[in-house]
Image (tube, grey):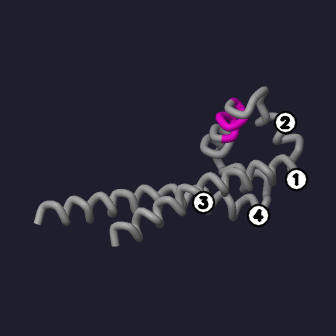
């Protein structure tokens, strides 16, 4: 159970970053004017600006752009991080229970 939870956590974290990559590709290809606002001078500044755009807009960026595919990746991006943290806490709880019996 412990190893399965850790494997699920790794999959969720990888999915989190892959979803972010897919959203960046979608923005760059389908919404070039908005991508020009996000794109920075280097990779790190672009990543920071993308984080700010994805987390800081109300309503969420996919809803503003009315892009269904971007919305799917946005939901995966938001949900996978929550699942990863919940899985990590569950794995830690399993480990703690195993050592304190």
Q: Which residues are magenta?
A: 45-50
**Quarter of the image where one finds residue 6:** bottom left
Q: CA distance from mark 2 to mark 4?
A: 20 Å
Circle 2 packing at 10 Å, graded few (<14), some (14-19), many (20+), is: few
Q: CA distance from mark 3 to mark 4?
A: 16 Å
Residue at 62%, 40% (x, y): give it: 56
- Label 1 sits on a secondary structure element that is helix
Q: CA distance from mark 2 to mark 1?
A: 12 Å
Residue 13 as seen in the image, left or right of residue 98:
right
Q: Which residue is mark 1?
A: 30
Q: CA distance from mark 2 to mark 3?
A: 25 Å
Give the label, 1 or 3, closer to the camera: 3
Residue 27 as seen in the image, left or right of residue 43:
right
Circle 1 packing at 10 Å, graded few (<14), some (14-19), many (20+), is: few
Badge 2 or badge 4: first in the primary sequence: 2
Residue at 65%, 43% (x, y): give it: 57
Q: Is residue 5 above or below residue 66?
A: below
Q: Is residue 48 above or below residue 101?
A: above
Circle 3 packing at 10 Å, graded few (<14), some (14-19), many (20+), is: some
Q: How many marks?
A: 4
- Label 2 sits on a secondary structure element that is helix
- Label 4 sits on a secondary structure element that is helix
x, y (%) of residue 69?
76, 63
Q: CA distance from mark 1 to mark 3?
A: 22 Å
* Residue at the extreme top of the image, as rendered: 41
Predominant SS of the magenta segment: helix
x, y (%) of residue 30?
87, 53
Disc 1 and disc 3 in contact, CB within 8 angstroms:
no
x, y (%) of residue 47?
68, 37
Q: Which mark is drawn over residue 69?
A: 4
Q: Which residue is mark 2?
A: 36
Q: Which residue is mark 3?
A: 15
């Amino acid at each position: 159970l412990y190893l399965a939870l850790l494997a699920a956590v790794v999959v969720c974290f990888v999915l989190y970053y892959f979803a972010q990559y897919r959203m960046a590709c979608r923005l760059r290809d389908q919404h070039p004017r908005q991508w020009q606002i996000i794109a920075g001078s280097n990779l790190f500044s672009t990543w920071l600006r993308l984080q700010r755009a994805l987390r800081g807009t109300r309503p969420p960026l996919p809803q503003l752009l009315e892009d269904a595919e971007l919305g799917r990746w946005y939901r995966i991006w938001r949900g996978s991080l929550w699942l990863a943290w919940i899985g990590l806490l569950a794995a830690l709880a399993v480990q703690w229970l195993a050592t304190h019996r």
